[in-house]
Amino acid sequence: MALRHAVLAALLEGEASGYQLSKRFDVSVANFWSATPQQLYRELERLGEEGLAQARVVEQQRRPNKRVFRLTPAGRAELREFTKRPARPMAMRDDLLVQVQAVDASDPEAVMAAISERLEHARGKLQLYERLRQQLLGGQSESRYLAESERIGPYLTLMGGRIFEEQTLRWGERVLAILARRTSRRASPHQP
Amino acid sequence: MALRHAVLAALLEGEASGYQLSKRFDVSVANFWSATPQQLYRELERLGEEGLAQARVVEQQRRPNKRVFRLTPAGRAELREFTKRPARPMAMRDDLLVQVQAVDASDPEAVMAAISERLEHARGKLQLYERLRQQLLGGQSESRYLAESERIGPYLTLMGGRIFEEQTLRWGERVLAILARRTSRRASPHQP
DNA sequence: ATATTCATGTAACAAGTTACATGATTAG
DNA sequence: CTAATCATGTAACTTGTTACATGAATAT
């Protein structure tokens, strides 16, 4: 039941509509919790019903009205309780690694192409993260920021995202090299 | 729809009952695809119905009979097709990182304890992976194995798992240090 | 004695995905 | 003029989780 708490944690950054939340998830929360807009709309609805978040309608002139949600004290309390409960072990689910696992019974070229795509994606993420990092730091040094900023949670999870993408790069490049060497040997084997 | 393909890929290692499969997932597949025994029983049932896997009953003397599933040619073909389709971007979902994101509105000590637990878990995983690695290599050097072994998919995903856990350690230790420095300052602040 | 392993399942529920529907506004 | 952005939702479906149920064998 942690979609709920991911949403509550995202609302710590400030009130948001469903649409805005889904953007927030796209750029930063998705590093540790991904959710579709539909999930977010549904969850915000429930949080509202249960009093963990409160909606107010913001009327706009040129845009459709939006329902902006903010944390209630009960929502903050629920989040605080959540951080004290044991975290369930992370469940990893990655299509690409299933493809790699099956590479021997399949087409290595296709798998290599899939890995290359993932690497491109990782490079894009790293650039985004660096921009977000500079934004968070706002000109301060990292050590000063970590010692004095009000909120460091988002910075720490950003660090996690960066490390994750860096490791994706290291792994993928290595695997690509291994598969390339292999397929060239298979194509022209000098000895059996 | 990749639980299906994770199961097919796991069956490449040889036929298995639901129970055996769930063990196989626990030790190695879980690094990239986690599933509960119930999911596996359900999926094996379907694979059987659709002709992608075939069950045969193995009667045992002292144990309950088991239904052992093996890949059919149709199952292999389906897996091959899967590796050629674009992999959907990985969806990450990690309770611990939600807790870290919310650390500022919560109890840092509890979050630190959760991180420590995760670190212990990562260390255990790394030991397990090293044992599995030695088993796969079977005394050969890595480069020889990678060049000549029939199947390298499981080794490549194992590499991924190892790198992932190593990075978890680096990240977690860093975060722990940051949070420790912070809480000690808050407890006895020398300057505001 | 007690816990763990082996072995399989049903049922109910929660979470996540995909398709569809609507419609104005602004940037290229 | 076309695509992207802003903004919300319903409905149907597929996955994933949790609780329950059974029962023998072996390891501590």
Image (cartoon, coloured by chain):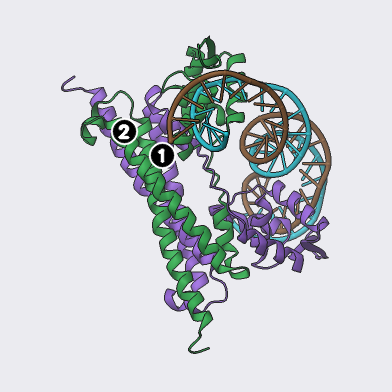
Chain colours: A green, B purple, C brown, D cyan
Residue at (77% x, 56% y) in the render: B47
| Residue position for label 2 | B179
* Crowd rating for badge 2 (residues with CA inside 10 Å; few <14, some 14–19, many 20+): many
Q: Say which label, 1 or 2, has the lower sequence index.
A: 1
- Residue A19 visible at all: yes
- The answer to whether marks 1 and 2 sit on the same chain is yes
| Residue position for label 1 | B115
- Residue B72 visible at all: no
Mark number, residue A39: none
Residue at (39% x, 37% y) in the render: A157
Task: Classify A11 as above or below B101.
Answer: above
Kind of residue at disc 2: Leu
- Quadrant in the picture for residue D7: top right
Marked residue chain, label 1: B
Q: Nearer the viewer, residue A144 or A120?
A: A120
Residue at (41% x, 64% y) in the render: A174
Coordinates of residue B90 in the picture (x, y in percent)? 53, 47
Total count of labels? 2
Q: Is residue A181 shown left or right of residue A155?
A: right
Distance from disc 1 to disc 2, alpha carbons, whole Å, reads 11 Å
Kind of residue at disc 1: Ile
Coordinates of residue B55 in the picture (x, y in percent)? 80, 62
Q: Nearer the viewer, residue C10 or A39?
A: A39
Marked residue chain, label 2: B
Coordinates of residue B58 in the picture (x, y in percent)? 81, 66
Q: Is residue B178 shown left or right of residue A29?
A: left
Locate the N terminus of chain A by quadrant: top right
* Crowd rating for badge 1 (residues with CA inside 10 Å; few <14, some 14–19, many 20+): many
Coordinates of residue B145 in the picture (x, y in percent)? 48, 76
Q: Are marks 1 and 2 in contact (CB under 8 Å)?
A: yes
Q: Callout 1: helix, strand or loop? A: helix
Q: Nearer the viewer, residue A5 or B20?
A: A5
